[in-house]
Image: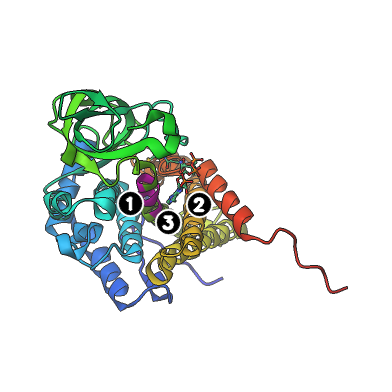
């Protein structure tokens, strides 16, 4: 067998640039290829100490903003790089960032998710006040939907926004609200405690279910907002519980239509679900690169680990899982960019494709990373090796922004709606 190229130090792992060959696929155009190439060269040059996740996240936002990468989170009219949010650019950015640093990817992604609802439904004044600052990295953004008893069942939220009327009366008279008072609690809020503002979803008509939810922009310094309860997780990143006690908001804080918040949240999540898939893909590609580097270098029974058919079979399975995730992820992004979501049928097709991508890419990445860790043997569980941190980093992606089970539900509902009631009769 042809000797395999050993790396100098197998325990340092695969440190080269993120791969870019996949950008040759027809889902992408020349601009995506050049974006991916430039970012892949930029990220490894950054020296950000990630020991303190909050400080690191701020530093990544600063670096990503200064270098212009955050401009892909907002449209050109508000300081963005492209006329509209481009799903393929988001996918390229997140995959490449996650390959090197899941925390860099997190910092980037939250700028997008935390400003997405403003891009989709903000008033011109809201867009001007927040989006350029997000694109520069001057404002840190956050998206506050989940509650202790309302995660997958987002419509079950209890946080309430009571309308205040000119007379000082409180109620649900939709026409004369001069402001709102927010009461409740949100949890699992990424960037909680370091964000400059939060897009908060709250009930404005509690009896109306998902049709009685509205979105608000809540500045971090709003009296009554407390984001000091940090949540520690297995792959540290800024996360907190928000307490909202009698937070007084002006009428201008309402984001989008009154009672239109649930759909706005779903539309925002839809855009970014394909990019969560891309982040998982970046981590899976990195795990595969680590496994290949290790297998080539590790001597065992008089040959290298990579010389064993068992190893080659595993690497083959990992590569196929990565490519399957890649194709679904790129298809979802391409559908949104190139087919659009204007008609109900298009929107339905994209929602299902994004759910398939998110489910498959995160689940496959978990398997690929687990296999890469297993291949590393004892080194795989040693704190400080890349596969060990990837093993922790990937886990939450199967849960946040719609758990795998929610994606299954979305895909299943879509299949029931779109497939014919009975299969065509067979010719025989
Ligand atoms: N885009 C636009 N509108 C959407 C939508 C989408 N992707 N998904 C649902 N809607 C609309 C529906 O069309 C429906 O509209 P009408 O009231 O006009 O009929 C409304 O929203 C309610 O939809 P549905 O009845 O499907 O809502 P459910 O309460 O059954 O919830 C799931 C459906 C489970 C899919 C939804 O709650 C969900 O995505 N949950 C996960 C939330 C999540 O990602 N949490 C993590 C938070 S961020 S880390």
Q: Is residue 51 above or below residue 306?
A: above
Neighbour tally class for label 3: few under 14, some 14-19, many 20 plus, Cα within 10 Å: many
**Residue range (magenta):** 264-270
Residue occupying the far top of the picture: 245
Q: Is residue 145 left or right of residue 82?
A: right
The image quadrant where one finds the N terminus is bottom right
How packed mark 2 is, by other alpha carbons closer than 10 Å (few <14, some 14-19, many 20 or more), is many
Q: Is residue 265 magenta?
A: yes
Sooner in the amino-acid sequence: mark 2 or mark 1: 1
The residue that disc 2 covers is: 368
Q: Position of residue 397 (x, y in %)?
A: 42, 44
Seen at 47% across and 49% down, the residue is: 362
Observer-side mark, 3 or 2, equals: 3
Question: Quarter of the image containing the C terminus?
Answer: bottom right
Label 2 to label 1: alpha-carbon separation:
19 Å
In-image side of 389 versus 359 (left or right): left
Q: Nearer the viewer, residue 289 or 134?
A: 134
Which of marks 3 and 1 precedes in the sequence?
A: 1
Kindly identify which residue carries mark 1.
12
SS under mark 2: helix
- On the image, numbered disc 3 is attached to which residue? 281
Q: Is residue 379 magenta?
A: no
Q: Nearer the viewer, residue 231 or 176?
A: 176
């Amino acid at each position: 067998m042809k000797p395999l190229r050993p790396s100098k130090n197998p325990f340092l792992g695969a440190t080269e640039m993120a791969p870019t060959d996949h950008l040759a696929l027809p889902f992408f155009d020349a601009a995506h290829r050049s974006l991916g190439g430039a970012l892949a060269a930029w990220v490894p040059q950054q020296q950000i100490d990630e020991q303190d996740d909050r400080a690191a996240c701020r530093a990544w936002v600063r670096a990503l903003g200064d270098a212009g990468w955050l401009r892909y989170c907002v449209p050109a009219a508000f300081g963005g790089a492209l006329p509209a949010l481009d799903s393929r650019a988001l996918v390229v950015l997140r995959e490449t960032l996650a390959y090197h640093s899941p925390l860099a990817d997190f910092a980037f992604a939250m700028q997008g998710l935390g400003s997405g609802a403003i891009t989709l439904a903000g008033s011109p004044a809201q867009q001007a006040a927040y989006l350029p600052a997000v694109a520069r990295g001057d404002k840190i953004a956050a998206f506050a939907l989940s509650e202790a008893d309302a995660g997958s069942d987002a419509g079950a939220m209890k946080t309430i926004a009571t309308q205040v009327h000119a007379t000082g009366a409180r109620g649900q008279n939709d026409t004369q609200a001069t402001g709102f008072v927010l009461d409740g609690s949100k949890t699992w809020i990424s960037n909680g405690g370091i964000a400059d503002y939060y897009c908060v979803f709250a009930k404005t008509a509690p009896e109306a279910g998902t049709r009685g939810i509205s979105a608000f922009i809540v500045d971090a310094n709003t009296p009554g907002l407390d984001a000091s309860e940090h949540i520690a997780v297995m792959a540290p990143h800024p996360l907190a519980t928000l307490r909202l006690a009698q937070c007084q908001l002006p009428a201008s804080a309402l984001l989008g239509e009154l009672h239109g918040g649930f759909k706005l949240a779903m539309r925002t999540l839809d855009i970014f679900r394909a990019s969560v898939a891309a982040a998982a893909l970046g981590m899976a590609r990195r795990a595969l690169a680590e496994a290949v580097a290790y297998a080539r270098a590790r001597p065992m029974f008089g040959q290298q680990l990579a010389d064993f058919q068992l190893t080659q079979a595993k690497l083959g399975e990992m590569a196929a899982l990565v490519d399957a995730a890649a194709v679904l992820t790129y298809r979802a992004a391409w559908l949104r960019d190139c087919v659009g979501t204007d008609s109900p049928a298009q929107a339905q097709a994209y929602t299902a494709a994004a759910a398939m991508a998110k489910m498959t890419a995160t689940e496959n990445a978990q398997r690929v990373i687990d296999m890469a860790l297993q291949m590393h043997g004892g080194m795989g569980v040693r704190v400080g090796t890349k596969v060990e941190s990837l093993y922790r980093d990937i886990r939450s992606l199967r849960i946040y922004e719609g758990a795998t089970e929610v994606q299954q539900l979305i895909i299943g509902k879509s299949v029931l709606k779109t497939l014919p009631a009975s299969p065509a009769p067979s010719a025989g």
